Image: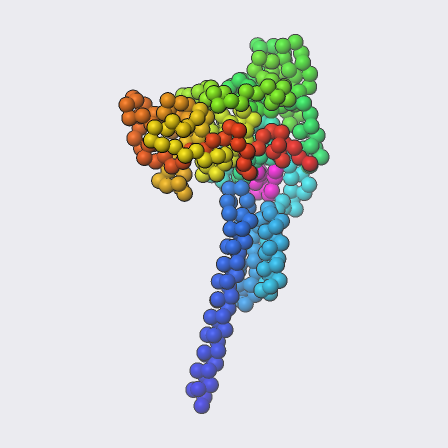
Amino acid sequence: MKKICLISICLSFFSVTLNAQEAFTNLQDSLLKIKEAYAPDLRVAIFEVAPTDSEGIVTIKGKTNLPIVQKAIQRLCDTNGCRNEVTLLPTADIGDANYGIVNISTAFVRAAPHYESELVTQTLLGTPIKVWEKKGTWFRIQTPDGYLGWLTETSFKRQNKRKQQEWLAKEKVIFTDFYGQTLTHPNKKSIPVSDIVAGCLLNKTRKVGSFYQVTYPDGRTAYIHSSQCRLLATWIKTLPNKNIDIVNTAERFLGLPYLWGGTTTKAVDCSGLVKMVYYLHNIILPRDASQQVKEGQKVEFSPTYKELQLGDLLFFGPNEQRITHVGIYIGDKQFIHSSGTVHITSLDPLSPLYVERYVTRLQTVRRIVGHTTKGISSLTTNSFYTLQ
């Protein structure tokens, strides 16, 4: 009899254990569904969430920057009787200073908060960003294309929403030369304040002869020769945005070195080149090739490529679901791309610029000019620049 009771108790224990394990697995599956629904791309959304079980008490811990995720997790906890300890970013130590403006010509955004971490992207002087959390002297930030990463505190001016709106409301100049320096005085021989690259934005203070006096996010003042920049409003209004203009801008990048994570006129990776070329025509594209391939209009093409237009984006990879490279079509079966350097490659077997692997790996073509899709914005429509 004692033996039967002991067996019964053991079976009951294992049944409870199995039920608990099954419930925990179901909870993990539910969290995965929440991620897939609201944060499928962790390059643009923070979803660092997992359940833990301590002595039978199940707690969901982690962090997210999406209020809708926090609410979904709370509903899940209410239904399953577990604790919700998911932090909604920004963290308390950020306070209301959860905005910022990039304060150096080229800010290096890394995957983790240390200098040895992978460079994931770059962002330009004058770019508005969101700030989510802090670790030491590093901040997790988000750029106008939605990309997330870590910046050092010396790379940007952190401020509250009101100060951000004040900065954004002021008249701007955009640097249109590829490289240059801002100067301490309205004189080309004066010493520099900093370097500057194409696409950088600064507040205009006044015009002094052939120079603009400008202000940095941190309050520094400098001068830029008017031949190297334009008033932003005028630049936007008069910007040529035809297919040939995209090609002409892309050709200015020829010879630049390849840099993983590079998105400026100093060095670029393949999608960084595409992003920067289109940015210089006031078109903000997603950061990576695998994101860019979802934008614009798909172009069906034949082996002659006669359907392609100047400025179309050519996407390459082992299959259409795994895009690893992108280039800009410039006509005559040729495209500009960054691989080792920025250079021209041909799809024509008779051309000395022909590389066979690009023909076999060309998966799809997308047309951006004239097409507005969810991931495309501009300096006048992107919410980071039009902060309400």
Highlighted magenta segment, given as a residue range: 130-142
Q: Residue 362: image x %, image y %?
A: 36, 34
Q: Residue 230: image x %, image y %?
A: 60, 17
Q: Is residue 157 visible?
A: no
Q: Residue 212: image x %, image y %?
A: 64, 15
Q: Is residue 321 visible?
A: yes
Q: Residue at x 71, y 35 (%)?
A: 162
Residue 124, picture quadrant = top right
In terms of secondary structure, what is the magenta stretch mainly?
strand
Q: Residue at x 32, y 23 (%)?
A: 353
- Asked whether, in this view, residue 360 is left or right of residue 22, the answer is left
Q: How many marks?
A: 0
Is 161 in front, or is 317?
Answer: 317
Q: Residue at x 42, y 21 (%)?
A: 254
Of the 4 image quadrants, the one containing the C terminus is: top right
Q: Residue 81: image x %, image y %?
A: 60, 65
Residue 358 in magenta?
A: no
Residue 365, picture quadrant = top left
Of the 4 image quadrants, the one containing the N terminus is: bottom left
**Residue lying farthest to the bottom in this orientation:** 1
